[in-house]
Image (cartoon, rainbow, N blue to C red):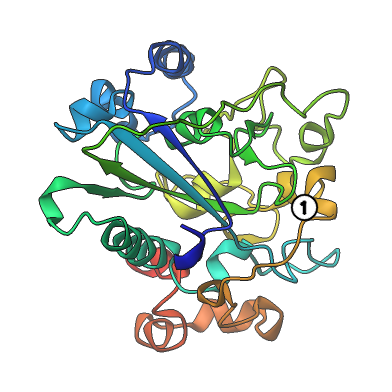
Amino acid sequence: MAAVGFDVWGVVPAVELSDAKRRFEQWLAGGNAYRLDYLERNIHKRFDPQALHPGTRSVIVGAVGYKNHLSEGYEAGFDCRVASYALSRDYHDSLREMLRQAAQMLGFTEPKSVKVCVDSAPLAEKSLARLAGIGWIGRNSLIINPRLGSFMVLGELLVPEECDEYSEPYGESGCVGCGRCLLRCPTGAINPQGGINTTLCISNRTVERASEEPFDTRGWLFGCDECQSCCPHNASAPHYRNPRFEPTFSPLDYDSEFWANLTPEEAESRFGTTPLMRRFKK
């Protein structure tokens, strides 16, 4: 996995994640999935890799860091902020390429024998990442690795072979006695016991655009890094090493007038390869 660009990875058996499923259903029942109806579909597949892709015996989980110069935050008063993951080529495309390369290197040459998953697939990737030893699920609901912090994206490869030895799950949470993300979140979207209320989440409101009702995004145009830029585990995390995650633009080069007058055609020309294009395709 390192050969194709992943920074950390692990392998877990393809078994049903019953405890994670129960917690997810409780989260849904609490009204936290604001208009994200797709989360209520395929729940049995989300927590059972074999149901998602019959014949799966193991799940290879990979993570790659994307931290860049704007991951650490913007200056106060700047009101055209874009989450740092959206500054580079769309991670869905990059991760799929990397996972397909990994499958080839591992000898899985029959495309239908494996399944490549990024976060658009109904798969509990954060639960799998914890079981794969990549990190713990932080209070802000993100996977946090002790070296890379939380500025990571995840990808999974569902394979039809058992492994001689599986990864050790990550143990204790490192989110103890801190609470900085709780205090930093501008809208109070982080539940004190962990997890996100997406009704209040700026990232959800600006990326999913689930509703056109008024909502103060606190200067964020797309996504939000507030709960990450303040996290002590991200303070010493290294910047990206995989060239696929090199930023292709800087929001600092554009003001509010530019964004107000930007046409879909110009957006495609400037930002067409990045996740930011979701804003212009709704």
Q: At x 59% / y 46%, what residue is drawn? A: 202
Q: Is residue 231 visible?
A: no
Answer with left or right where residue 49 lies relative to residue 279: left
**From what the image shows, is residue 192 above or below residue 126?**
above
Answer with left or right where residue 191 lies relative to residue 108: right
Q: 210 or 121, which is in the foreground?
A: 121
Q: Mark 1 — residue?
A: 229
Q: At x 55% / y 77%, what residue is drawn? A: 243
Give coordinates of residue 5: x percent, y percent.
50, 66
Q: At x 77% / y 56%, what residue is drawn? A: 237
Give coordinates of residue 132: x percent, y percent.
51, 34
Q: At x 59% / y 82%, what residue is drawn? A: 249
Label 1: state its secondary structure.
helix
Residue 14: quadrant of the picture: top left
Give coordinates of residue 254: x percent, y percent.
65, 83
**From what the image shows, is residue 188 above or below residue 81?**
above
Q: Is residue 53 visible?
A: yes
Q: Residues within 10 Å of mark 1 (few under 14, many from 20)?
A: many
Give coordinates of residue 252: x percent, y percent.
71, 79
**From what the image shows, is residue 76 above or below residue 41?**
below
Answer with left or right where residue 110 lies relative to residue 93: left
Residue 101: quadrant of the picture: bottom left
Amino acid type, residue under disc 1 in the picture: Ser
Q: 34 or 228, which is in the foreground?
A: 228
Instruction: Tell how many labels.
Output: 1
Answer with left or right where residue 82 lies relative to residue 101: right
Location of the C terminus (image quadrant): bottom left
